[in-house]
Every structure is written in C-alpha cells, then in structure tokens.
Image: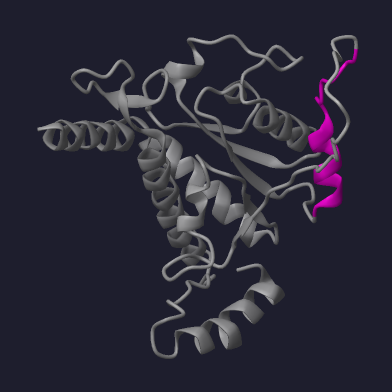
C-alpha cells in the first residue's frame, strides 16, 4: 500500500535527521538559550510553510518564541502592458522590514528555504546578518547543491547564516514514487523541520535551566486554568525578562 511506503519514507527521514543533525541541533539549542539568557529575542519566520506555528502560542510551547512576517501591498489596477524595460528586482527590501521590526543586534532569527534560494528568504537572512542578527536556516543540502544561487552575493542560504539545519529533504522536496503519477508524492521538509524545531527547543530549555532560568512553557488555553496561568503569570514574565 502507498500508506506503508509513505510510513517507511517518514521513518527513514526521521532517522536521517536525528543521526546527521544532532550536532547542529545541540549548537542551535545552545544559541537559542544564550540569546534568551542575554536578553535577546528569538523570532521564527515562516519555517517550511509556517510549521513554526506548532511551537508558538500553544500548549507545550515556550513563550520566548515570537513570530516574524512581513509583506508589502502595492495597488495594481491599471491595464496590462509590457513592462520589460522596468527593473522590478526587489533585493534589499528586507532591510526596510527589519528596520521597521523590533529586532536588534544580538537577536536570533530562524528562516527556511528548502531549495536555499527563495528570494525573499535569502534576502531576509542576508540583511539580518548585516544588521548583527544571528540567523539559523532550515534547508535541504541535497536540494540546494543541485541549484544555482539567485542572490546578488552569489550565495545560497546555507552560505550566509550562522547555522544551517539540513532538513534532509530530497531534491524537489517529495519522498515517494506513487504508481501512475509523474510527480513524487509527500513533502519531507515539514515533518523534518517540526522535529528539528522541537529538538532544538528541548536543548534550549535544558540549557536555560542550567543557567538558573526557568523559561515559561505555555499551558493549553482550553485546559482548566490554562488561560489564566498563561495570561497572569507567563506572558507578564516574558514581557519582563524575555522568557
């Protein structure tokens, strides 16, 4: 059955992530803990189609993770015309987004591009590093090594960040051959990134405790007393200390 083939592919993916990324997981967890302990903020920005929301503002998740996203809306209602003579490149736009955010040098930003060349992601990582922000990236090393960079620096995402987490996704993302279907089936990176994020967080929580810091871990808002606990204790604690 395709179900069994999929389950086997997932098992192999998880095993590969755990065995090949353990050192990076520990390094990333230590970086998170160090950032929080030093008063910095930690931001997650659209990790693999927003898998970061599995950790943010939910039961079991730490208060020290904050979401970061930006967009620019431009009204376009004129008739369609040839604009080939217009330079419509937008490299450097992320600089303005970062300036308008509440990020500071020493903060930590996590970003994601499976191919390692998604324009807005690479631009954000590049500008964040210029600003003195630490960057952890989630990417597929197999995928990114098979494509050319698009950033003016000539670098792919993994080449411009502090830690590159390999989500071990195959080139073009999907894992399984389904009979009679040309494209492969079942994306790998979401599963891998969720495991990586929680693993890094486990290290970070432990390292913070070793530093004498007990980070806020949210209770489910739907569990009796959970919402009051979060609102009366944990969120004020985060506002005061950053954890």
Left or right: residue 141 compared with residue 4: right
Asked if residue 90 lies in the magenta stretch, the reply is yes
Q: Position of residue 20 (x, y in %)?
A: 33, 30
Q: How many numbered markers are drawn?
A: 0
Q: Nearer the viewer, residue 130 or 151?
A: 151
Residue, far front: 79
Residue 145 vs 50, above or below: the answer is: above
Left or right: residue 69 compared with residue 130: left
Q: Which stretch did the figure color magenta?
A: 86-101
The image quarter containing residue 83 is top right
Q: Residue at x 55, y 55 (%)?
A: 33
Residue, far left: 1
Left or right: residue 29 compared with residue 158: left
Q: Position of residue 192 (x, y in %)?
A: 37, 39
Asked if residue 191 lies in the magenta stretch, the reply is no
Q: Residue at x 51, y 56 (%)?
A: 53
Viewport quadrant of the N terminus:
top left
Residue 19 vs 198, above or below: the answer is: above
Q: Position of residue 219 (x, y in %)?
A: 44, 77
Q: Residue at x 40, y 56 (%)?
A: 202
Viewport quadrant of the C terminus:
bottom right
Q: Position of residue 195 (x, y in %)?
A: 36, 46
The image quarter containing residue 154 is top right
Residue 37 vs 2, above or below: the answer is: below
Left or right: residue 147 compared with residue 104: left
Q: Nearer the viewer, residue 52 or 127?
A: 52
Residue 67 vs 45, above or below: the answer is: below
Q: Nearer the viewer, residue 185 or 20?
A: 185
Q: Nearer the viewer, residue 155 or 146?
A: 146
Q: Residue at x 21, y 31 (%)?
A: 9
């Amino acid at each position: 059955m395709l179900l069994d083939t999929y389950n086997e592919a997932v098992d192999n993916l998880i095993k590969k992530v755990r065995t090949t990324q353990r050192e990076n997981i520990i390094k990333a967890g230590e970086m998170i803990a160090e950032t929080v302990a030093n008063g910095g903020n930690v931001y997650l920005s659209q990790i693999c189609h927003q898998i970061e929301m599995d950790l943010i503002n939910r039961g079991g998740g730490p208060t020290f993770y904050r979401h970061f996203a930006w967009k620019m809306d431009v009204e376009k209602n004129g008739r369609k015309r040839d604009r080939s003579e217009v330079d419509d490149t937008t490299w450097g736009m992320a600089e303005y987004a970062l300036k308008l955010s509440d990020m500071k040098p020493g903060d930590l930003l996590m970003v994601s591009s499976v191919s390692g060349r998604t324009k807005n992601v690479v631009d954000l990582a590049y500008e964040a590093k210029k600003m003195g922000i630490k960057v952890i990236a989630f990417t597929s090393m197999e995928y990114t090594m098979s494509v050319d960079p698009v950033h003016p620096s000539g670098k792919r995402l993994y080449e411009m960040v502090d830690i590159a987490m390999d989500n071990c996704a195959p080139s073009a993302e999907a894992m399984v051959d389904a009979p009679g279907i040309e494209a492969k089936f079942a994306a790998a990176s979401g599963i891998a990134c969720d495991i990586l994020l929680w693993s890094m967080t486990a290290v970070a929580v432990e390292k913070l405790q070793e530093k004498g810091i007990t980070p806020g871990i949210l209770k489910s808002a739907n569990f009796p007393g959970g919402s009051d606990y979060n609102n009366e204790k944990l969120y004020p604690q985060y506002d005061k200390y950053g954890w």
